[in-house]
Image (cartoon, helix red, strand yellow):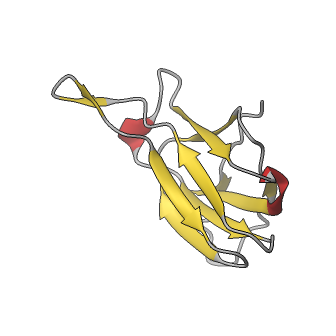
Amino acid sequence: MADHASTDVASSVGATVTERTGAATGDTVPAGTLVLWRNTGVGAHTVTLTTNNTAGDLAVADRTIALAAGTNKAGRVPMEWGDANGRVQVAIDATATEVKYYVLGGI
């Protein structure tokens, strides 16, 4: 399990960002960050973000992100999805190490 911190990319001169390698379960990212997902494999993958919240006492479904082979997707992880520590769990199906991602903050 790894609690990945975000990299502050607010600078206009650019920032060095750390590539993370997917894991089947256990990794977390900070709520409120922007994540760039990259599928380096030849097959499709599904990334699941645990939402950790309710609306009107009803559980909010976990968010799934479909990544076709060789594609990139970016999206914000909403603040309200964070757990008590402000973290959102990430799970990746199949050969999880084929999915690389970048956790971006400061924007």
* Residue 42 shown left or right of residue 66 in the figure: right
Q: Is residue 107 visible?
A: no
Question: x%, y% of residue 87?
Answer: 55, 33
Give the residue drawn at x 74%, y 70%. Answer: 43
Of 103 and 97, the residue lying toward us: 97
Vertical arrangement, residue 7 with respect to residue 85, above or below: below
Q: Quadrant of residue 106?
A: bottom right
Give the residue drawn at x 46%, y 33%. Answer: 82
Q: Is residue 22 visible?
A: yes
Question: x%, y% of residue 73?
Answer: 57, 71
Of 1 and 32, the residue lying toward us: 1
Vertical arrangement, residue 32 with respect to residue 99, above or below: above
Q: Quadrant of residue 101?
A: bottom right
Give the residue drawn at x 49%, y 42%. Answer: 31
Give the residue drawn at x 53%, y 52%. Answer: 33
Of 64 and 105, the residue lying toward us: 64
Vertical arrangement, residue 87 with respect to residue 66, above or below: above
Give the position of the N terminus as an image quadrant: top right
Question: x%, y% of residue 74?
Answer: 55, 68
Q: Quadrant of residue 97?
A: bottom right
* Residue 46 shown left or right of residue 82 in the figure: right
